[in-house]
Amino acid sequence: MIPALMPTYNRADLAFERGEGAWLWTTDGRRMLDFGSGIATTSIGHAHPHLVRTVAEQAAKVMHVSNLYRVPQAERLAQRLVDSSFADSVFFCNSGAEANEGMIKAVRKYHAENGHPEKFHAICFEGAFHGRTLATLSATGNEKYLAGFGPPVQGFEHVPFGNMNAVRDAIGPQTAAIMIEPIQGEGGVRPADLDFLRALRAACDEFGLLLALDEVQTGMGRSGKLWAHQWAGIEPDVMSAAKGIGGGFPLGAVLAKEHVAKHLKAGTHGTTYGGNPLACSAGNAVLDVILADGFLDQVDATARYLWDGLRQLVARHPTVVSGVRGAGLLLGLQCTPEVVNGEMQAAAVAEGLLTVAAGQNVLRLAPSLIIGRAEVDAAVEMLDRTFTKAAERLRAAAPAK
Ligand SMILES: *Cc1c(COP(=O)(O)O)cnc(C)c1O
């Protein structure tokens, strides 16, 4: 019989009762170190006192009023995001997919309002992930996810990630934008070369296209800078954010330069929940932490320490893992063809560590940004035990020479 909770996920048989910082406690009393963060979402850890207090106080006052009225919490959060990014204006919504929908609509509207309604195509990349709505699935382009859902939404072309010749070849009279994750998260923690991102910016300027960045996973300090594109020293025209922005409370955002944002006039786009007082109070509390003096420097330092630890694991366990990639606290361990990332993820759970599998047989680490060296040491130790056992199993299974 079908479970009451629709079976769209293969869930691990773990349920959590409470969390504190980087740690979670299961309902049967086990303590687990969380290096998955609910898929890069609980950016300031579990039960952060400032976030908990802010959300509880706001919930007791007013949670939701709709966008028919002014929402001071949203005005404040938007202003703070504008002050700390390339953007001039922000639209709030509830998820990453919804932020990308808004971004795609903003791109199309921009060209339509500039007299080019035929320009509605976005150049996207193989291995991308942009969400599960019909348009964002089409932008994702993964045949497996699209199967059975009718014709994809028109206007998304896919070229190999990192291939500038392919991008230039794909640009045509209908091209409106280039849409890319600075680091492909679900696709296997694959960072775009910084020079590639700069070349995309230059191509957008040359051909009058918009650079649309999906920073749903890479944003809000995850890369060690507030926005991952800052590593390349470029600015997009429009960008989506979600995941870490609410620290676990559902919140998404479209950040845009004025030349894009000004076309989304009253009535062109909307949401009932988006940017409500509760969600935006969560967003403000998360920003209080992430924008505090020295916080991102600390993330960067911790990330480099974690990177070193992972490099040592690769050196010690070459039959299990072959490399590290990513940026900041979004790192991927490349599993060798002899092992399966999902099995490594399950084996790490047995050692007390939560991670997330990603594409290309990668084991993804995305701890909350508040961790320090002690949590890194603990995680590296757990992975060391996980990989030692995996290597032993491989040796035992190998045919005798
Ligand atoms: C998770 C993710 C999304 C989708 O976000 P949802 O909140 O699940 O809709 C979109 N883009 C990227 C890069 C993501 O990592």
Image: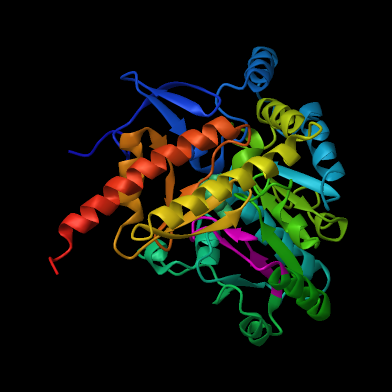
Q: Is residue 248 visible?
A: no
177 in magenta: yes
Q: Position of residue 12 (x, y in %)?
A: 31, 38
Rendered residue at 56%/49% (across/down): 308
Q: Quadrant of the N terminus?
A: top left
Q: Position of residue 239 (x, y in %)?
A: 72, 55
**Is 392 placed above or below 68 here?**
below
Quadrant of residue 40 within the rendered picture: top right
Horizontal side of residue 236 vs 97, given as left or right: right
Between 10 and 26, the residue placed more toward the observer is 26
Horizontal side of residue 183 vs 174, given as left or right: left
Write the start and end of the magenta stretch as one range: 176-194
Rendered residue at 73%/73% (across/down): 200
Between 357 and 118, the residue placed more toward the observer is 357
Q: Position of residue 156 (x, y in %)?
A: 58, 72
Q: Quadrant of the C terminus?
A: bottom left
**Is 192 placed above or below 89 here?**
below
Rendered residue at 23%/57% (across/down): 394
Rendering colour mode: rainbow
Horizontal side of residue 341 vs 124, given as left or right: left
222 in magenta: no
Q: Is residue 294 visible?
A: yes
